[in-house]
Amino acid sequence: MTRAVLSIGSNVGDSLAHLRSVTTELGSRLVACSPVYRSAPWGGVEQQDFLNAVVVAEDEAFDAWDWLRFGQRLEEAADRVRVQRWGPRSLDVDVVVCENLISEDPRLILPHPRAHERAFVLLPWLDVEPDATLRVGDDDVPVTELLARLCPEERAGVVQQEWSLQERPEEQEGVGDGSW
């Protein structure tokens, strides 16, 4: 069985619905799902804020490449268009870690090479795995420590929302109407 941590984000269209499509498609493979967070865009491209979450999933038939293909299939279903690096996207699904696998293949670098720099990955990950560690270089570093290393502005820019990815949209105020 492989266990994967996936970081999901969206800032185009019905972002909450795009994130929910991931948990829906995971079905029984979903082990844990963080709350939804709002974060400023990362990478210097002017655009709308993102909604982000982290999910933990398991599937005995999946390897890391299957998790990558799973994410790419969901991105395609959400009509993701890759025009600009770190640009707006309907859905972004990144494999953060898959078991303890280390991969330097340029198509699938594991652990994710920038996860340790991103509060929008680390904060939601801690919600679902408070004891999580991430390999950075040759060291396995607690995610709590990686988060503490980030500048206060980076951490403060990631704000937990009241929405859940496991509730129906009609149960949540302000969902799907662009008010977030």
Image (spheres, helix red, strand yellow):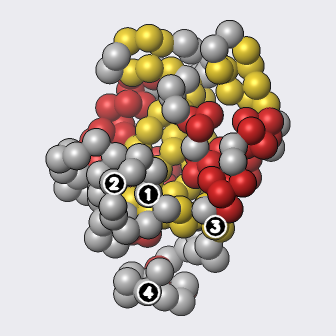
Type of the residue with mark 3: Val
Disc 1 secondary structure class: loop
CA–CA distance between discs 1 and 3?
13 Å
CA–CA distance between discs 1 and 4?
18 Å
The quadrant where residue 111 appears = top right
Disc 4 secondary structure class: loop
The quadrant where residue 101 appears = top right
Residue denoted by label 4? 179
CA–CA distance between discs 2 and 3?
20 Å
Find residue 55 and report its horizontal and vertical position in percent.
Answer: 57, 47
Camera-side mark, 1 or 4 = 1
Residue drawn 64% across the image and 67% down it: 159
Q: Residues within 10 Å of mark 3 (few under 14, many from 20)?
A: some
Type of the residue with mark 4: Ser
Camera-side mark, 2 or 1 = 2
Relative side of 161 to 16, left or right: right
Mark before the other along the chain sequence, 1 or 4: 1
**Badges 2 and 1: C-beta atoms under 8 Å apart?**
yes
The N terminus lies in which quarter of the figure?
Answer: top right
Q: Residues within 10 Å of mark 1 (few under 14, many from 20)?
A: some
**Badges 2 and 4: C-beta atoms under 8 Å apart?**
no
Residue denoted by label 1? 41
Disc 2 secondary structure class: loop
Mark before the other along the chain sequence, 2 or 3: 2
Q: Residues within 10 Å of mark 4 (few under 14, many from 20)?
A: few
Residue denoted by label 2? 45
Find residue 84 and report its horizontal and vertical position in percent.
Answer: 22, 46
Mark before the other along the chain sequence, 3 or 4: 3
**Badges 3 and 4: C-beta atoms under 8 Å apart?**
no
Residue denoted by label 3? 159
